[in-house]
Amino acid sequence: EPEVTQTPSHQVTQMGQEVILRCVPISNHLYFYWYRQILGQKVEFLVSFYNNEISEKSEIFDDQFSVERPDGSNFTLKIRSTKLEDSAMYFCAGRASGNTIYFGEGSWLTVV
Amino acid sequence: AQSVTQLGSHVSVSEGALVLLRCNYSSSVPPYLFWYVQYPNQGLQLLLKYTSAATLVKGINGFEAEFKKSETSFHLTKPSAHMSDAAEYFCAVSARSNDYKLSFGAGTTVTVRA
């Protein structure tokens, strides 16, 4: 069964460093998302992406965050200058033309 | 705007007992409702979904949920718990009008006692 795959599964980074989280969505997916889950909290929407542009972003998704799909397959989330409060599990997700979003395994980001 | 509330952050059941996880939603438009499960150190896996067809929805691993519009609820049940059901369960809501963006509940952690 096709899966959304994410790399790395876990990354530890120093505060102020740039981080790129990568995702390979399912091939027929058209809509792409990043969500995050801070330990012990809700899963929160960050951004949605369609047709090579951001379609919606939350207030969490400030200028420190960016997304792109440079080669038509990988979908990346970049955090330019990480803060301690960026420590979380980041989930990539995708959707075809239907109503169901499928999630990857997640990338644990620890900022120290 | 849409939201869900999951009642009970932690549920403990005996193996073989009924599992009941409660979810109430708020939505100004017809909702799509989902239950996702997260096993330890894993991602979010879709258990089942309600998308305006049958109100009783069957999912994987013996789980089912019933959409009750009058009660704005979408509770998840399983008649007989297995040890492998220990996980965190998330209720989520979306709508066509907001491009199916999911809003999650806080999650319910299920532990199963032998």
Image (cartoon, helix red, strand yellow):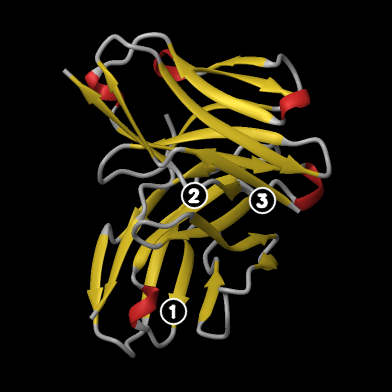
> In the image, residue A47 lies at what x, y percent?
60, 64
Any mark on residue B101, and which? 3
Residue at image position (48%, 54%) is A43
Q: How crowded is mark 3: few (under 14 residues within 10 Å), some or many (20 or more)?
A: many
Amino acid at the residue labelled 2: Pro
Please rate how many residues cluster around mark 1, counting C-alpha atoms within 10 Å: few if below 14, some from 14 to 19, many from 20: many
* Front one among A96 and A59: A59
CB under 8 Å between callouts 3 and 2? no
Amino acid under disc 1: Ile
Query: How far apart, in angstroms, are the residues tagged by discs 3 and 1?
Result: 22 Å
Q: Earlier in the sequence, mark 1 or mark 2?
A: 2
Q: What element carries label 3?
A: loop
Is disc 1 placed on a helix, strand or loop?
A: strand
- Crowd band around label 2 with a 10 angstrom C-alpha radius: few (<14), some (14–19), many (20+): many
Q: Do the residues labelled 3 and 1 touch (CB within 8 Å)?
A: no
Residue highlighted by disc 1: A79
- Residue A28 in view: no
Rendered location of residue A66, percent (x, y): 54, 77
Question: Up-down: is A77 above or below B31?
Answer: below
**Can the viewer see residue A9?**
yes
The chain letter for the residue carrying disc 2 is A
Which residue sits at x=48%, y=18%? B77
Q: Which of labels 3 and 1 is toward the front?
A: 3
Kindly identify which residue carries mark 2.
Answer: A25
Q: Residue A54: horizontal and vertical position, in percent?
A: 67, 68
Residue displayed at 70% across by 46% down: B100
Q: Where is residue B26 in the image (x, y as percent from the top left)?
A: 72, 42
Judging from the image, what secondary structure is the residue with disc 2 in?
loop
Identify residue type, mark 3.
Lys
User: Do labels 1 and 2 touch, CB within 8 Å?
Assistant: no
The circle drawn on residue B56 is none
Is label 3 or label 2 in front? 3
